[in-house]
Amino acid sequence: MAVRRITFTVSEPDAGTRLDRLLAKHAAIGRKRARELFAAGAVRIGSRRPSGGEPARAGDQVSCELVDDAAEPDPTLPLDVRFEHPELVIVEKPAGMPSAPLAAGEGGSLSNALVARYPEMAGVGYRPREPGLVHRLDTQTSGLLLCARSPSAFAALKAALSAGALHKRYLALCQDRDLPAQGAIDRPIGPDQQHPERVRVYEQLPRERYARPALTRYRIVERRRGLLLLELEAPHAVRHQIRAHLAYVGHPILGDVVYGSGQHPELGSRHALHASYIAWAGEGTLPSFEVRSELPRELAGLLA
């Protein structure tokens, strides 16, 4: 695990700016990570440990040592590539594998496999632990993930995702109770302050800034053996959106222990949510694509 030393001198134009903002800029890290480093006493000006909210003074030399939390390459991990291009790849993540390491130095994630196969992904993406990932899937969700192989491809695909130009669909299983054949769940979602492992669905957008609008569309594909197979779309998905929205309307996903359905005896630790489709019209040098993934065997078996 590499340790990176960051040193910079505060310039006249930056004087008065919060120190945590300057550290985030010079170290190419997020504001949250910068605040954590100040709180841990890892940042110094001379022999003094300043606070992150302190205004910078021109001429001060700021130093910080931080553990480089980039995903370590692991060529022993399986990688199921469904579409490959010099600028991007689409892979299928199995349930039980994290999209990225949860902490510095952790292994066993899709990111570790990706950077081993595609070393050019290192440094591409939102943060070092997520090389190339344009979006993520929860650990117990299986399915298709889009990954960029260059900074320019990442920027274009991120913009397409934000604009709703990337079309993604999901398949989910839940109990067959009273649910219309198709519909939409349009309710804001924000963090659950009492339970950090989950999110909270609101009746309307609250004043708190952390809640965001969220729309999930669904249609029933099949009814069998007391179960519903749903196809869902969430154009601008926020964390746990589909899982939380379905639980909110009384149809939690099978096997979802966080949102109320409990562990399913035939599914082990996974839940019955699968990212089944991703498509894009392409732009510039980036290709168009349309990739589908069938329902995994363990989920299809519940309908057989």
Image (tube, grey):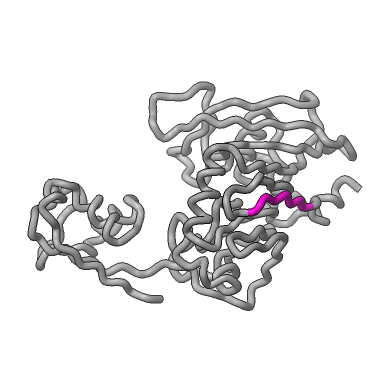
Q: Is residue 152 magenta?
A: no
> Foreground residue, 8 or 88?
88
Give the number of callouts.
Answer: 0
Front in this rendered view, residue 171 or 124: 124
Residue at the (67%, 34%) spot, across then down: 246
Which residue appears farthest toward the right when viewing the image? 304
Q: Position of residue 121 (x, y in %)?
A: 52, 66
User: Does residue 185 appear in this view?
Assistant: yes
Image quadrant where one finds the N terminus:
bottom left
Answer whether residue 93 is visible to the viewer in this image.
Answer: no
| Residue 70: quarter of image | bottom left
- Identify the residue at image location x=13%, y=52%: 56
Whole-percent x, y for residue 220 in the image: 80, 32
Q: Is residue 153 above or below residue 70?
A: above
Q: Position of residue 95 (x, y in %)?
A: 68, 57
Q: Quadrant of residue 261?
A: top right
| Residue drawn at x 57%, y 39% as measured from the top left | 237
Left or right of residue 232: residue 176: right
Quick check: 211 above or below 291?
above
Name the residue rendered at 16%, 50% in the picture. 14
Q: Which residues are magenta?
A: 287-293
Foreground of the two, 189 or 193: 189
**Left or right: 46 with respect to 114?**
left
